[in-house]
Amino acid sequence: MNIFSYVLLFLQLSLLFFSSYWLIISFFGLGKIPRAPQKNAKKRFLLLIPAHNEEKVIGNLVKNLLDLDYPKELYEICVIADNCTDKTAVISRNLGVAVLEHTSLPQEEKGKPHAIKYAFENIGNKLTEKFDAVAIFDADNLVTLNYLKEMNNHLLNGEKLVQCYLDTKNPKDNFITLGYAASYFYMNRAWQLARYKIGIGNAIGGTGFCIDTQVIKKVGWTARSLTEDLEFTAQCLLLGIKATWCHEARVYDEKPTKIKASALQRLRWARGHWEVCFKYSARLLLRGITKLDFKAFDAAVYLLSPARALLETSVWIIAVIGIYIFNQNYFTLYPLWLFVPLLFLLYTYTVAVFRIDAEVKFSKTKALVAFVFYSISYIPLFLWALFTYKNKTWIHTEHTKNISLQKQQ
């Protein structure tokens, strides 16, 4: 073996670790779903909705939240009209909810994390005096009516940061939205539920998450990356506060139907992921080792997942070049007898998840193909994001799916 072979062997060993790690954990997502003990309504909630020019969808979400199966005196709704130039604020006020209008100064950065920061600063000490928890939604969402009942159960169970099930509002629109939906079904069970069942930390996913106000007071809201949810999760873990998972309540999120819009949205997510990775992965890994905190170690492994995707792609390219150009077989750890069964396990698991968790009927074969395409198409986005992660330009994703929760279900 030459130096090149040893390098490739090391890379393959790294990939074997990542692949085995994810696969083993994913199997804990199967079986019975643990539920927080049922409790009487007690916790007081503030429901925050950051919204930038969302007049087409904001009304249905506000009406949806007003109908939640929870005592009306125990929750309030506040829309953050963030640099809006349409009727988002007017529609929200006409529906009887509070509105905070936020206009950024020319030199200020724009985007969701800054809008949330503005709201917390304006609410001030009243946040902890008046509310026990804050739930954050995107303006295009729809939410199952049991959401606050389930969050109340989890909070009274001692949990401090809870993410609900992330579903897709428009999975059957086209091949692109089906790819999003398939990816969410897989991650919700293979990654989120699995980790909840074995007691390691989850991750909040941008919408539908609930935070104990004492956590906000302790951690603060300093997340400014393009994936403020992932950054806040890391910040909490460094203080020993883990996120947990609620599989019973769902939030439906509208996904782009155009290739360009999808690419721009996921490029933003990829850039944010790299930034959080560079900023927090080493600190989480150190905490995992020095404090024997497996939750922190697991989070560090997840933050390195874009690197894993690029590494795996590179290994396969190098190996194929070695075979067809240099007539050298570099598949020392990934022979077909190992690779094919692993691939079969992954796709069998994925199809099983579609059958278990999907609320709408669709072709499982088509969904699997969409899932594979969605995953592979992330590779060039991760690569481009690696070199441009400091670009924090927030590109708004337009939402137009104006439907009620009743039509969604």
Image: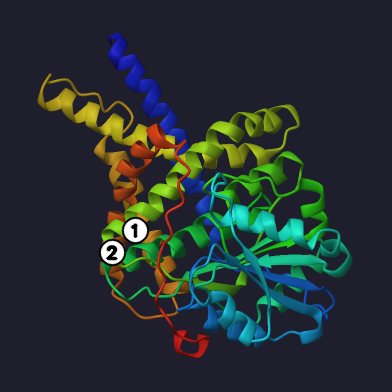
| Picture layout, residue 1 above or below residue 26 | above
In the foreground, 395 or 6: 395
Please give the count of numbered marks on the rendered protein. Answer: 2
Q: Residue at x 43, y 39 (%)?
A: 306
| Residue 144 appears anywhere in the view | no
The quadrant of the image that shows the N terminus is: top left
Left or right of residue 303, residue 267 in this image:
left
Asked which secondary structure carries label 1, the reply is helix
In the foreground, 146 or 355: 146
The reply to whether the C-beta atoms of the residues labelled 2 and 1 are less than 8 Å apart is yes
Query: Picture coordinates of residue 65 (x, y %)?
Result: 63, 81
Left or right of residue 268, residue 296 in this image:
right
Within 10 angstroms of label 1, few (less than 14), some, or many (20 or more) residues?
A: some
Asked which secondary structure carries label 2, the reply is loop
Distance, label 2 to label 1, CA atoms, is: 6 Å
Q: Quadrant of residue 63?
A: bottom right
Q: Quadrant of residue 155?
A: bottom right
Q: Disc 1 marks which amino acid? A: Ser
Query: Picture coordinates of residue 217 (x, y %)?
Result: 81, 52
Q: Quadrant of residue 19?
A: top left
Query: Picture coordinates of residue 245 (x, y %)?
Result: 64, 62
| Picture layout, residue 141 above or below residue 214 | below
Q: Residue at x 86, y 69 (%)?
A: 130
> Seen from this angle, which residue lies furthest top?
2
Q: Disc 2 marks which amino acid? A: Lys
Residue 258 is marked as: 2
Determine which residue is flagged by label 1.
Answer: 262
